[in-house]
């Protein structure tokens, strides 16, 4: 049972790290998405949400100034 809880905690932490990386690469608030990524079961929703959000770093290049 202890191994299962450790495994689930490690997977949860890895998903939170991936949420941080995705948010940082796309230009979204890293702290917010990392905090949301630490919530169990909700972190998968946040991760998939980040996968489909547009990239803000390249969006500014296409807008006229």
Image (spheres, rainbow, N blue to C red):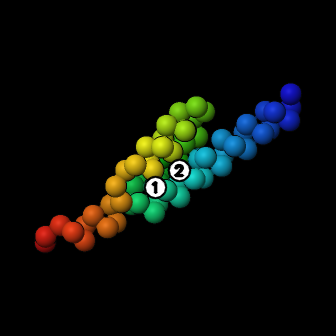
Q: Establish if 13 lies above or below 62.
A: above
Q: Which mark is residue 56?
A: none
Q: Quadrant of the N terminus?
A: top right
Residue at far left of view:
65
Proximity of marks 2 and 1: CB atoms separated by less than 8 Å: yes
Relative depth, front residue between 31 and 6: 6
Q: Residue at x 80, y 38 (%)?
A: 6
- Look at the image and tell me whether residue 12 can be seen: yes
Circle 1: element type: helix
Instruction: Locate residue 40 relative to residue 31 in the image: left or right.
Output: right
Disc 1 packing (10 Å; few <14; some 14–19; many ≥20): many
Disc 2 packing (10 Å; few <14; some 14–19; many ≥20): many
Residue 51 lies, in percent from the top left, at 45, 50
Q: Which residue is mark 2?
A: 19
Q: Which residue is mark 1?
A: 23
Q: Residue at x 66, y 41 (%)?
A: 12
Residue 3 lies, in percent from the top left, at 86, 35
- Look at the image and tell me whether residue 32 can be seen: no
């Amino acid at each position: 049972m202890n191994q299962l809880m450790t495994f689930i905690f490690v997977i949860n932490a890895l998903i939170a790290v991936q949420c941080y990386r995705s948010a940082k690469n796309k230009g979204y608030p890293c702290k917010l998405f990392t905090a949301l990524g630490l919530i169990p079961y909700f972190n998968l929703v946040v991760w998939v949400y980040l996968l489909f959000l547009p990239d803000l770093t390249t969006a500014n290049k296409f807008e006229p100034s």
